[in-house]
Amino acid sequence: MTEFLRPRIVISKCFGFEAVRYGGGIVMNPLVKKLADSVDFIPVCPEMELGMPSPRKPLDIVMVDYRLRLIQHGTGKDYTNKIISFSNTFLQSLKEVDGFILKSKSPSCAISDATILIDGKKDTVSLNRRGFFADRAQKFFPQAAFIDENGLNDKKVRYQFVAKIFGLASLRNGMKSTKLLKEIHLFPSDLI
């Protein structure tokens, strides 16, 4: 009998794990709750990992001199280098990841809809940008499935995500089985 390999999913910690949103809130989603029995979640809140509290003043992605910066609203504190450093260290520490469930519109976790302020002006915004953590995640794990809560609420997108994470986990399982069979010499090396 083939051993079932559970998909490994990095998930924004605010999805039912802890009240870590900038306003002190938590996000509940029924699919996340359903998946909990079948996947291994790796919860993370990049902003909390930077030492920020919850609640906290929100962060903004700001275009300054044609460079994107992660600036805390109201304080002007620049977290750009910290979030890049954390993201690289965290993502490098992961061995196998099949998917990511991330918070939409987040300056750290958005996969496609983060807002960019041009020179800090709220009236000049641009959308369709990944957050800093999500951007690094997609570079480290380009094959992984990515979804946010907007996608979780879309039946077709949700189905594609679930199919992909289980497909990737199955592929990882198959690769491990093939490696094992090769190691015990059941397949000639030139066939694998």
Image (cartoon, rainbow, N blue to C red):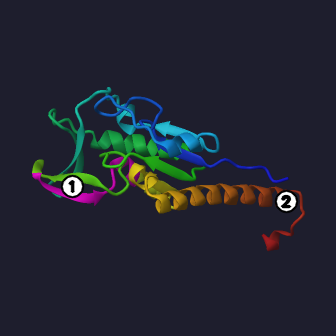
Q: Quadrant of the C terminus?
A: bottom right
Marks 1 and 2, Cα distance to the nearest angstrom? 50 Å
Label 1: state its secondary structure. Answer: strand
Q: Which residue is mark 1?
A: 67
Question: Which amino acid is tagged 2?
Answer: Leu
Label 2: state its secondary structure. Answer: helix
- Number of callouts in the render? 2
The verdict on residue 160 being magenta is no
Q: Which residue is mark 2?
A: 181
* Mark positioned earlier in the residue sequence (1 or 2): 1
77 up-or-down from 160: above or below? above
For the point 30% across and 55% down, the residue is 113
For the point 28% across and 31% down, the residue is 23
Kindly identify which numbered label has been placed on residue 90.
none
For the point 33% across and 55% down, the residue is 130
Work out whether residue 21 or residue 93 is closer to the camera in this orientation and state it.
21
For the point 42% across and 47% down, the residue is 102
Q: Residues within 10 Å of mark 2 (few under 14, many from 20)?
A: some
Residue 95 visible in rendering: no
Q: Which residues are magenta?
A: 123-135
Quadrant position of residue 124: bottom left
68 up-or-down from 51: above or below? below
Work out whether residue 80 or residue 15 is closer to the camera in this orientation and state it.
15
Residue 91, horizontal then vertical, whole percent: 49, 46
Residue 161, horizontal then vertical, whole percent: 53, 58
Question: Which amino acid is tagged 1?
Answer: Arg
